[in-house]
Image: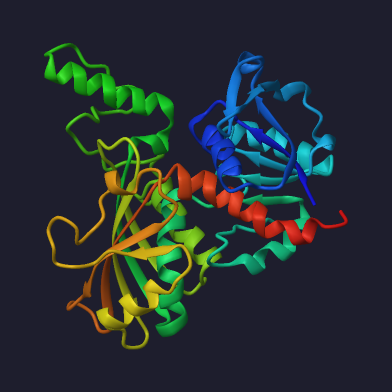
Amino acid sequence: MTMRVAVVGATGNVGREMLKTLAERRFPVSKVHAVASKRSAGKKVSFGENDVLTVEDLETFDFSTCDIGLFSPGGKVSAEYAPKAAAAGCVVIDNTSHFRMDPDIPLVVPEVNPEALKDYKKKNIIANPNCSTIQMVVALKPLHDLATIKRVVVSTYQSVSGAGRPAMDALFSQSRNVLTHQPIEVEPFFKRIAFNVIPQIDVFMDDGFTKEEWKMRVETQKILDPRIEVVATCVRVPVFVGHAEAVSVEFERPMNPDTARRILKNAPGVLVVDTLDPEDGFITPIDCAGEDAVYVSRIRKDPSVPNGLMLWIVADNVRKGAALNSVQIAEALLPMLKGK
């Protein structure tokens, strides 16, 4: 069985990675459509090594011709067009934040809660979680199954690619201008990102947390367990690709580092790199760029709480944190679409 697939937002970072991932994983397609805004219509994008697609106009695209739509065009655009596509019979897998907390829309990480896909027909839309949430819950799921997590305290170190191509361009140009003593434009950030860190991702909420920090809490609860308490501090760092997280976990039952390593080494989607070797004993964002896995390093006991553990979790936010997870959802959906 082959699928007709539309990639919406095909000219953006994530859209291009979706096309690349579909080709690399040999997703069974009979037709792939690259779809974007009117201003991008007519442009060319790659699909695999040999195929080039012409971008089609989202405003006039007929979603009834597609079985699956992989959406990453921005929240406002998804809010308008995802329901239209779903009503036309196209199952939407949306990478924006717009639908994530809708109780009738599954929020899915295939290694963690594939069973949630059974409810996709309620609105014909499936939500892809926040990139930072995805890598954290992939690592936490097998540990939660064994010892039950009570509380998570996480600090993130998030690359500029999480804010899109303009943010990547800003890091490049600001870095160049710092080194050449040229004037610096801080946009699209509020402060300079080059050789700096910014403790704000997304807007501030009334309680002092940012929306990104709120997302990590509520999404983890929806995906993994509503009883888990999560508190996050999300920081933008001058890295192009790859998010890192320092995570402290408190369990209901004992959990030691050796047990955690053993469990994680057998967990789907996880690679453990954890020794005391300063060169090869842990993974950094530059090491994970272009890779599928969620890497876990620096597994150690947290002596400040009973049954505590500390982890360093790293993943490519554009790939596993967006494009790959969306394609994995589509792969998990395939048996349900037989005979559709």
Q: What residue is shown at x 80% (from left), y 56% (from top)?
A: 337
Q: Quadrant of residue 245?
A: bottom left
Horizontally, residue 228 falls left or right of residue 306, namely: right
Horizontally, residue 180 falls left or right of residue 321, namely: left
Horizontally, residue 95 falls left or right of residue 207, namely: right
Vertical placement of 150 versus 40: above or below? below
Furthest residue to the front? 50
Rendered location of residue 96, percent (x, y): 56, 42
Q: What residue is shown at x 54% (from left), y 52% (from top)?
A: 325
Vertical placement of 253 versus 237: above or below? below
> In this view of the protein, which residue sits in the foreground, 208 or 1?
1
> In this view of the protein, which residue sits in the foreground, 173 or 296?
296
Rendered location of residue 220, percent (x, y): 48, 63
Vertical placement of 269 versus 315: above or below? below
Rendered location of residue 63, percent (x, y): 80, 34
Horizontally, residue 232 falls left or right of residue 198, namely: right
Rendered location of residue 293, percent (x, y): 42, 56
**Residue 148 seen in this snapshot:** yes
Q: Quadrant of residue 304?
A: bottom left
> In this view of the protein, which residue sits in the foreground, 44 or 102?
44
Q: Quadrant of residue 97?
A: top right
Q: What residue is shown at x 27% (from left), y 83% (from top)?
A: 256
Q: What residue is shown at x 35% (from left), y 68% (from top)?
A: 152
**Residue 102 seen in this snapshot:** no
Furthest residue to the bottom? 253
